[in-house]
Each structure stands twice: as structure tokens, then as C-alpha cells.
Amino acid sequence: MTQPTDIRREHLSTALSLAASGVPPLPLRAGKVPFGNCPACAKNACSGRPNMKTPGPCTCPHPCHGWAAATTDPHVLNSPTWQRAWQAAAGVAFHPGGASLTIVDLDNADAITWARASLPATRTVPTTRGEHWLYQGAMQSANAVRPGVDIKSLMSYARWLGPGTGTLTVLPDVVHALIVKEPAPARPVAVTVPAPGASGQCPHRTPTYLDRGIAMAEQQITEAREAVHATVYRTFLAVLSTHGRCGCLTDTHTARLFTAAQAKGESPRHCTDAWTSALTTLGLSHV
């Protein structure tokens, strides 16, 4: 039978192996959570470490401040203060963002089904309830980006459950888009929009002007590398501010914009919501 002391030695050995590969580890206590702060750091009295959201001067030798204590320095990992933590450790965690990684944490079978249909294949690690999908690249962390899905990267930690299987894929836009909040319903505002000409002809209804505008809008959406949903909303807003009342836009033009957005991972519902929100912002009831 494996003795507790052997398991704790394995934790430190795992941590040193991770550090050697550029992945910053930290010990976890019972409950799969980081160790609490020492008395000097309790309630953030030390003002925190330099790598925290609000940088502080703390250089505490203990594994305080959760993910912010994760390090690849073997001298720190083997130090007497960390040795005491390893002796009581129940597991090993790591800071994904510190290794330029992002984890899509899938907490149940439904979330896994969604990921397999919506995300590019990448390295996966089985977890107690679901799977971790690892991507190369760091981003903002966020919880509950959709049912059963969390994003763990910068300023976060994840339990080390092994290297996983599969080829690591570059972090895709569709994962970046998961943390973009839907534009809040806006109150109508007064704006100046083109009005039909005296002859009843739309002043913009020339193939060159309209086609160039729609093509530029498609290009702006297609070239978005992050915050895709916000880019889609801003692009829809720009198009509608120019052509929202003058009769230029047809279903064909709208379909082109929606197609460009969906090619970047937006769902039809997201496209409709962004379009509706842009209409509301401009005080337009319909197009």
C-alpha cells in the first residue's frame, strides 16, 4: 500500500517536473484548494504579490495568495517553508496563464457534448466530473461562461490531473468569445442618420458605395482575433447608423453580415441579439 509520505513526495516530484517544463505549480491542501495565507499575509495585509490584479510588494516565502504563489523556481519549491506545505499537501495545482495555457473546464456530459460540437479538437484531460480542454495561449479567466463551462487561464489555478492526450491547439477565437458579455439593452438615443432624398431615391443606393461598405464590414468581422462578439455588435452598429433608415439594406446584405459573424463562431441567436441591440441603440424599431 502506498504510504502518505510517499504520496507527498510524489506531489513535490510532480511539481518539480512541471516547473522544469515551464508550468508553474503550487500545493493544494485537503479540499483541492490552495493553502491559506500566513499571518503576515492574512486578509491581504501585505497588499499582495506583484503579479496580482492589484500589484503589491509581497515577497512572502510561504505559498500564500493562491495562484499568485505558483512558481517555476525549484529553490522556492524545495524551500523549508514550501516543504511544510508539501508534507501536508493533498494534490498539485498549476497556474495555466503562467504557462501560456487556457483550460476550458467542462463540468458535465452536456458541456462535453457542446464542446465537441463547437470547439476545435485539442489536448484533453479527464476530470472527476468531466474534462479539461487545454489550448495554447492565455486569456482572461471567467466562471460559468455557459452552463457547466469555466475558463481557467490568467489569475486562476487548476488541479494537475496529468498531461492528457491529443495535440495542443492554438487558442481559438470561439473560446475568446465565450467571455464577451452580451451588450446590455440600450435606451434609444438620438442620432443623425441618412434620410431618403427628395426624389424618394436612397442617396446611398449605388453599387460602389453600398457594396464597399458591406465588404468592409465583413472584413472587419472576419479579421477579429478576440472579443468577436463585441466586434460583431460594433460592426452592426456602424452599418445600421449609415444605412438604417435609408432603405439600402436588403435581406441579402444582412445575411452576408450574419454569415461572416457565424463563420467566427457566433450563433444565429447571438447575431440576432446583437442586431436587435444595435437597432435599439440607434432608436430604430425595424429594418
Image: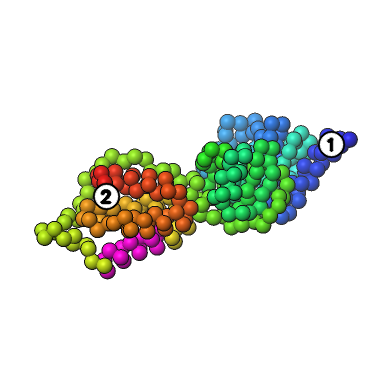
Picture disc at residue 53 = none
* Image coordinates for residue 237, horizontal then vertical, percent: 32, 52
Instruction: Tell me where residue 13 appears, x and y as whole percent.
Output: 79, 46
Question: Which residue is at 22% across, 62% downward?
Answer: 204
Per the model, the C-alpha gap separating discs 1 and 2 is 70 Å
Does 216 lie within the magenta span?
A: yes
Q: Going 33% across and 61% down the picture, which residue do you hit?
A: 214
Rendering coords of residue 251 (x, y %): 31, 55
Quadrant of the rendering where the N terminus is positioned:
top right
Q: Amino acid at mark 1?
A: Thr
Q: Position of residue 124 (x, y in %)?
A: 66, 49
**Magenta-highlighted residues:** 208-221
Identify the element where label 2 is drawn: loop
Going from the N terminus, do you reach mark 1 or mark 2 first? 1
Seen in the picture, residue 49 relative to 176 is either above or below; the reply is: above
Q: Which mark is residue 287?
A: 2
What's the amino acid at mark 2?
Val
Residue positioned most to the bottom: 208
Residue sticking out furthest to the left: 198
Q: Quadrant of residue 170?
A: bottom right
Q: Quick check: 195 left or right of 171?
A: left
Which residue occupies 77% across, 42% down? 11
Q: Left or right: 208 with respect to 94?
A: left
- Mark in front: 1 vs 2: 2
Which of the 4 image quadrants contains residue 197?
bottom left
Q: Residues within 10 Å of mark 2 (few under 14, many from 20)?
A: some
- Look at mark 1 in the image and give the residue it sits on: 5
Displayed quadrant of residue 86: top right
Question: 55 or 70, which lies in front?
Answer: 70
Q: Which is more toward the observer, 65 or 151? A: 151
